[in-house]
Amino acid sequence: MAEAFKFELVSPERLLVSAEVESVVIPGAEGEMTVMAHHAPVMTTIKPGVVTVKNASGGEERYVVFGGFADIVAAGCTLLAESAVAVKDVDRADLARRIQEAKEDAADAKDDQARSKAEQFLSQLTTLEGAILPA
Amino acid sequence: MPSLKDLRNRIASVKATQKITKAMQMVAAAKLRRAQEAAEAARPYSERMGSVLANITQAIGGGGDAPALMTGTGKDDVHLLVVCTAERGLCGGFNSQIARHARDHIRRLLADGKQVKIICVGKKGFDILRRDYASMILERIDLREVKTLGFVNADAIAKKVIHLFDEGAFDVCTLFYSQFKSVISQIPTAQQIIPAGVASTPAEAMEGGNAVYEYEPEPGEILSDLIPRNIAVQIFRALLENAAGEMGAKMSAMDNATRNAGDMINKLSITYNRQRQAQITKELIEIISGAEAL
């Protein structure tokens, strides 16, 4: 059994998780990564996606996050999410609204740079929707 | 001299008012608890944000790639004030305190020959500032429809502010709100959010915070993502503090009003009783003297 470390998932509204966990999968801006105990210190932004938390007691929990960043040090991992909800509580209407907004953003983007950024965000959202739909 | 009937009516109306103020006080007390819980729940995020920010600025070492939101435009000519007040009145001096603080600040800036722009969050501050500085108010943000204050509300305000900054509409942005000290004391506070004074967040770095970080993507890029978010967090915190402060002020104002109504009822009752007694005595005297005359 892997060693446990401290993981915290915080959204501006509240502290969602503060627990000893075995591993956490984080949707980093440059690819997913799994964090385990004694990870090298990393700071990364995260994209919209699913965070999978494997508890020290064995259970597994999944949360949907919409952007934010993670601060990983040897002592633990803090994930500051712009907004976070447990996968089972995801509001589909809210997700659809976000996708709609992202589509509008992509459509009104003024220059190529803004458009590609908006489109990237949109594709991340649709991937996310696909990932949690069967749940 | 008011008649007995007038007095009775007045007592009844003061009693009705007292019932209303009492109810408002209890509602405010319940809302205050909720607002305090929300403020408490938001604290870990802003604390962590502070420590992360401190870490990363240390890593960059104030190098040239720090974003403009942090270093400022290098000028100090146009000031943007974001004045956060409550949407509703009947909360004692709460709103006027914040407005007065903002007004003093505006006067000082104008005396120094600076240009001032204002964004009002909340109706009451807008009503007060409109009288003197209507031409400077860029926008009024209405949160009356908002039942529970969410991060999205703060984020929307932050986006507007940052958008204005990107357009070069101002150089310095200051946030006005009321710090929630306790139920009876709220301190009107001014906080500069752009350029962000990093020294103002002396957060303890997390254990092992001095370790060499790996950044993904580049520190500059993270920082430019982080600073706008930090501004939103600051505004969110200000709004939450304000919400708690408003309820606290309302609670103590309504408590005072209830007590005053009680005093008034006592006074009116005494007058009423005295007058009734006087009338009875008068009638008795009339009967007795009438009987004696026979």
Image (cartoon, rainbow, N blue to C red):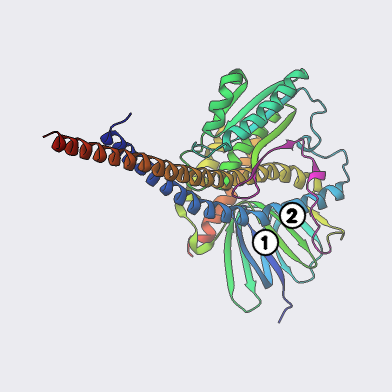
Q: How crowded is mark 2: few (under 14 residues within 10 Å), some or many (20 or more)?
A: many
Q: Residue drawn 65% across and 48% down?
A: B181
Name the one closer to the observer, B70 or B256: B256
Residue B31: percent from left, percent from top:
50, 51
Q: Give the range drawn in magenta.
A: B179-208
Chain letter of disc 1 in the image: A
Label 1, label 2: how far apart the Cα atoms are: 10 Å
- Say which quarter of the image contains residue B164: top right
Give the residue at mark 2. A44
Q: Kindly identify the amino acid type of the residue bearing the numbered disc 1.
A: Ile
User: Tags 1 and 2 in contact by the CB under 8 Å rule?
Assistant: yes
Nearest to N terminus: mark 1 or mark 2? 1
Residue B1: percent from left, percent from top:
33, 28
B8 horizontally vs B24: left or right: left
Residue B274 lies within the magenta run: no
Classify B56 as above or below B134: below
Which residue is situated farthest in the left direction here? B294
Chain letter of disc 2 in the image: A
SS at mark 1?
Answer: strand
Give the residue at mark 1. A26
A108 horizontally vs A44: left or right: left
